[in-house]
Amino acid sequence: MKERTYSMGIANAVTDFLTEDGWHFSFDEDHGIFRFDLSLKGKLKKVNYIVDIKDDEYLVYVISPIGADENDQKMMANMAEFICRANYGLKMGNFEVDFDDGEIRFKVHVLCKGITPTAAMIKRSLYCPATMFDHYGSGIGDIIFNDVSGKTAVEKCEKRSESEIRSILDELLDNEDETGISEESGMDAMVAHLAARFGITAGDEVGQSSEDTDNIEVHTDLFDKKGGTSA
């Protein structure tokens, strides 16, 4: 059988980032595959990573610790709708559901043809899936355990974005003298103002990074601790 080849340059770049960023990982040198776990603050608590290195690209697969029941047609239909609605408009990566076994994962593809990925590129590709699972994990759980529809589950998850902004504004409004913000200006107007300032447009989800990779720093508070947890 022909031995599989992969880019050592890409593999070394990923190794360097994971090491410097404090992740605990294993690497299959024969197949070019990294494996590690990551603890989250959200409903799912932990997700499993597979980083598959190829000749001029790599793929990041982040797998949910819970999956849908492939024998429950209603649940699978709700999960499929949830996945489609959550994926709509995403700027990087996508959710996937396996109809054969109910596995749920988030995938990011990074093309590296002619280049070695930078630390910023690797960081974005690894942090984005965890951010998305933190944002949508409660919806996955609602469908599996609470028989919630796909549409309702997505709406509950995406409502968090507005709720979090309003929570920040509530704190600001409590200190009007320092911020110059008055309740008379209206909560809705301030939500729009804050969203515009941080580049959030209607339909954007948490984890949809802008082209400025420095913004990925915003998402570091989603983790219990830096890096992954040992298997």
Image (cartoon, rainbow, N blue to C red):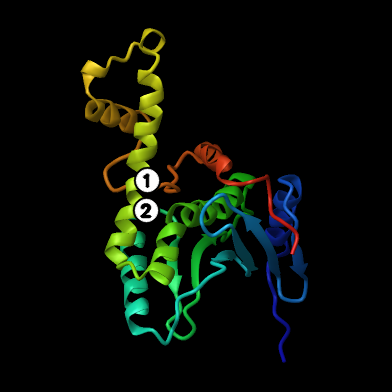
Q: Quadrant of the C terminus?
A: bottom right
Residue farthest to the top, as pictured: 177
Q: Are marks 2 and 1 in contact (CB under 8 Å)?
A: yes
Residue at disc 2, secondary structure: helix
- Residue 87 at what x, y percent from top left? 36, 61
Please give the name of the residue rendered at 43% of the width and 84% of the height, measured from the top-left corner: 70
For residue 109, above or below residue 191 = below
Rendered image quadrant of residue 168: top left
Q: Nearer the viewer, residue 22 or 145?
A: 145
Please give the name of the residue rendered at 72% of the width and 92% of the height, measured from the top-left corner: 1
Q: Left or right? Give the position of 69 relative to 63.
A: left
Marks 2 and 1, how far apart at CA? 6 Å
For residue 186, above or below residue 139 = above
Q: Nearer the viewer, residue 161 or 119?
A: 161
Disc 2 crowd, CA 10 A, few/some/many (<14, 14-19, 20+): some
Q: Amino acid at mark 1?
A: Arg
Q: Which residue is mark 1?
A: 160
Rendered image quadrant of residue 5: bottom right
Q: Which residue is mark 2?
A: 157
Disc 1 crowd, CA 10 A, few/some/many (<14, 14-19, 20+): some
Q: Amino acid at mark 2?
A: Cys
